[in-house]
């Protein structure tokens, strides 16, 4: 019997980048987060870089608020921007404190090439003013993180720096938001396939590089 199942558009995007996606969600960093064994210099480097990622990410969310075609979508992006600017940002500040990362260290650490790459692709996606392009990057950032965070084994490590990095990406609010992002891209992506594939594929590559580059510090 012919297989007549039509895959969701977001599933097609993931399949088109399957190996890179799997390499990212199964990365050593993810394994060590669940084991509670990420070396301190690696966690510090990762979070310094990721706090900058968050800044560009908020720019992209602003683009989503501006280009979404429904009020309901704008409200959801607005609520998510509130969470990122609140709970998630305070996690970073508490983690820097616990890891002994000083403001000077944060300032003096240069951007890695993947941080620069993320900043550039998020600004590029926002500048297209194409909702599908913006959604493609948002989907990778949030869905790929939800995927690794929900695949790991419980119980979580005791240390909040490790445990909370999992729970920030595996909770009811976050899971709902990822479901919303996917349904939006399933809805608007099929008429914007080329741009959606382009941004999605590049963002998956950057996610893998981002994990790799956290280990490019002495540890
Ligand atoms: C690099 C990266 N990708 C995705 C997320 C999830 O928002 C994050 N915090 N950092």
Image (cartoon, helix red, strand yellow):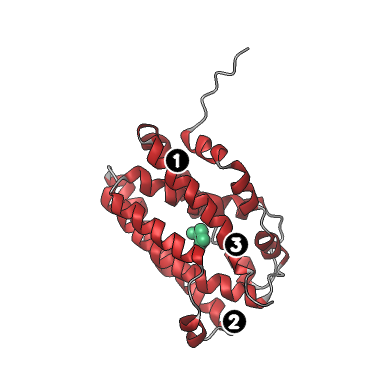
Q: x, y (%) of residue 206?
A: 52, 56
- Which residue lies at the image location 28% right of the left edge and 43% below the top edge? 70
Q: On screen, 93 above or below 170?
A: below
Task: Please give left or right for residue 166 compared with residue 51 in the image.
Answer: right
> Which badge, 3 or 1, is on the more N-terminal residue?
1
Q: Secondary structure at mark 2?
A: helix
- Which residue lies at the image location 56% right of the left edge and 42% below the top edge? 17
Mark 3: is the Cβ under 8 angstroms from ligand 1? no
> Which badge, 2 or 1, is on the more N-terminal residue?
2
Name the residue nearer the viewer: 36 or 53. 53
- Which residue lies at the image location 39% right of the left edge and 64% below the top edge? 56
Q: CA distance from mark 3 to mark 1?
A: 22 Å
Could you say which quadrant of the image residue 168 lies in?
Answer: bottom right
Q: CA distance from mark 2 to mark 3?
A: 21 Å
Q: x, y (%) of residue 91?
A: 51, 72
On-image quarter of the N terminus:
top right
Residue 215 shows which numbered tag? Answer: none
Q: On screen, 93 above or below 71?
A: below
Name the residue nearer the viewer: 175 or 122. 122
Residue 98 shows which numbered tag? Answer: 2
Density class for disc 1 (Cα within 10 Å; few <14, some 14-19, many ≥20) is many
Find out whether the residues at labels 3 and 1 contact each other: C-beta distance under 8 Å.
Answer: no
Task: Please give left or right for residue 187 compared with residue 13 in the image.
Answer: left
- Which residue lies at the image location 49% right of the left edge and 54% below the top edge? 141
Name the residue nearer the viewer: 112 or 107. 112
Which residue is tagged 3?
Answer: 211
Density class for disc 3 (Cα within 10 Å; few <14, some 14-19, many ≥20) is many
Density class for disc 2 (Cα within 10 Å; few <14, some 14-19, many ≥20) is few
Could you say which quadrant of the image residue 216 lies in?
Answer: bottom right
> Which badge, 2 or 3, is on the more N-terminal residue?
2
């Amino acid at each position: 019997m012919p297989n007549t199942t039509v895959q969701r558009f977001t599933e097609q995007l993931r399949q088109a980048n399957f190996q890179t996606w799997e390499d990212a969600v199964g990365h050593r960093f993810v394994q060590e987060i669940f084991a509670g064994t990420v070396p301190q210099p690696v966690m510090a480097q990762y979070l310094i870089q990721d706090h900058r990622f968050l800044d560009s990410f908020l720019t992209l969310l602003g683009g989503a608020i501006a280009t979404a075609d429904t009020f309901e979508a704008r409200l959801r992006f607005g609520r998510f921007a509130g969470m990122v600017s609140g709970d998630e940002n305070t996690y970073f500040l508490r983690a820097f404190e616990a890891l002994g990362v000083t403001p000077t260290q944060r300032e003096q650490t240069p951007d890695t090439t993947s941080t620069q790459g993320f900043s550039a692709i998020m600004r590029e996606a926002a500048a297209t003013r194409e909702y599908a392009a913006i959604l493609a990057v948002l989907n990778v950032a949030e869905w790929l993180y939800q995927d690794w965070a929900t695949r790991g084994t419980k119980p979580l490590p005791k240390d909040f720096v490790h445990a909370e990095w999992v729970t920030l990406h595996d909770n009811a609010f976050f899971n709902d938001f990822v479901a919303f992002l996917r349904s939006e891209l399933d809805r608007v992506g099929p008429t914007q396939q080329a741009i959606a594939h382009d941004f999605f594929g590049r963002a998956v590559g950057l996610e893998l590089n981002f994990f790799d580059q956290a280990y490019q510090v002495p540890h």
